[in-house]
Amino acid sequence: MDFDNALDLFERTLATERSRPDVHTAMLALALPDTIGTASTQIQQARARGERVWMTADLHLCHANVIRYCNRPFANVTQMNKHLVSQTQKIGDGEWLVIVGDVAMGEHQLAMEWIRRIPGRKVLVLGNHDLTRSGECRYLAERALDGQRPLFDAVLPFLASKDELGQSVFVSHYPATVDHSFGRLLNYHGHLHREVLEPTETTHFVNVGWDVTQGLVCL
């Protein structure tokens, strides 16, 4: 899937979601061809070499209400944060982790302390809760524990590539809104928490959100 087709697909997807003008405008402003192309290629090449690539979504670190909303098995937000971050410790320092949106919500600075404990090369595919209502993405300025590197290798609204079978792969927080012109598509997504979409004739949806997987997905 080339960038223009992927951008068209992303714009179609945004048009079918609940209107969030400032948030969605900010997402589109971060749809930079070089950034998306480089990250998509690096992750696909890692998979082709047989390296582990991890995915998750909707961690909602520091978000106490998500425990009740999604019936998560935690007594409090601190217990939840500890458990979710402990699950990431299996990730190698050179391995990729793609967080498909909504990494945290609530106390931003406290959430940053937890996110800095997550190993690996992290890519954030933006979800609606990763920006303020005015469209500000605070993750762009955050640094890793050493203070030298960005916290995320890339922050972007989607990834797009071809898999080993030549199938188009699209990674987006919102599940993709697809018409037949895109051909066969594998869509890794989040946003729906516990809901799992049925495949269509052209599209296979994979919800990598924590409330479905209760852990990480290894591609």
Image: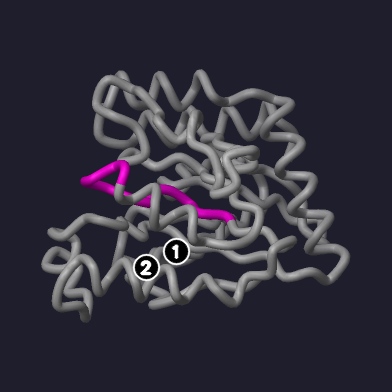
Q: Foreground: 71 or 81?
A: 81
For mark 1, give the secondary structure. strand
Q: Residue 91 magenta-drawn?
A: no
**Residue 184, located in which quarter of the rendered image?**
bottom right
Per the rendering, the mark at residue 193 is none
Q: Whole-percent x and y of residue 65?
A: 13, 59
* Distance CA(mark 1)–CA(mark 2): 6 Å
- Asked whether, in this view, residue 136 is left or right of residue 69, the answer is right
Identify the image quadrant of residue 53.
bottom right
The three-letter amino acid code for the residue at tag 1 is Asn
* Location of residue 65 with respect to 134 vertically, above or below: below
Towards the viewer: 17 or 41: 41
Q: Quadrant of the N terminus?
A: top right
Kind of residue indicated by mark 2 = Val
Which residue is at a point 21% across and 46% down the rendered structure image?
A: 106
- Of callouts 1 and 2, which one flags the residue occurring earlier in the amino acid sequence? 2
For label 1, the crowd category at 10 Å Cα-Cα, with few meaning under 14, some 14 to 19 and many 20 or more, is many
Q: Residue at x 43, y 68 (%)?
A: 85
Picture coordinates of residue 74, whole percent (x, y): 20, 78
Magenta span = 98-109
- Which numbered circle lies on residue 196? 2
Give the farthest residue toward the right. 49
Q: Residue 207 bears which disc, if any?
A: 1
* Secondary structure category for the residue under label 2: loop
- Residues marked 1 and 2 touching at CB (< 8 Å): yes
* Quadrant, the C terminus: bottom right
Residue 88 screen position, x and y as percent: 52, 70
Magenta stretch: dominant secondary structure: loop
Taking the image as shown, residue 197 lies to the left or right of residue 36, namely left
Q: Is residue 18 left or right of residue 54?
A: left
Q: Residue at x 64, y 60 (%)?
A: 120
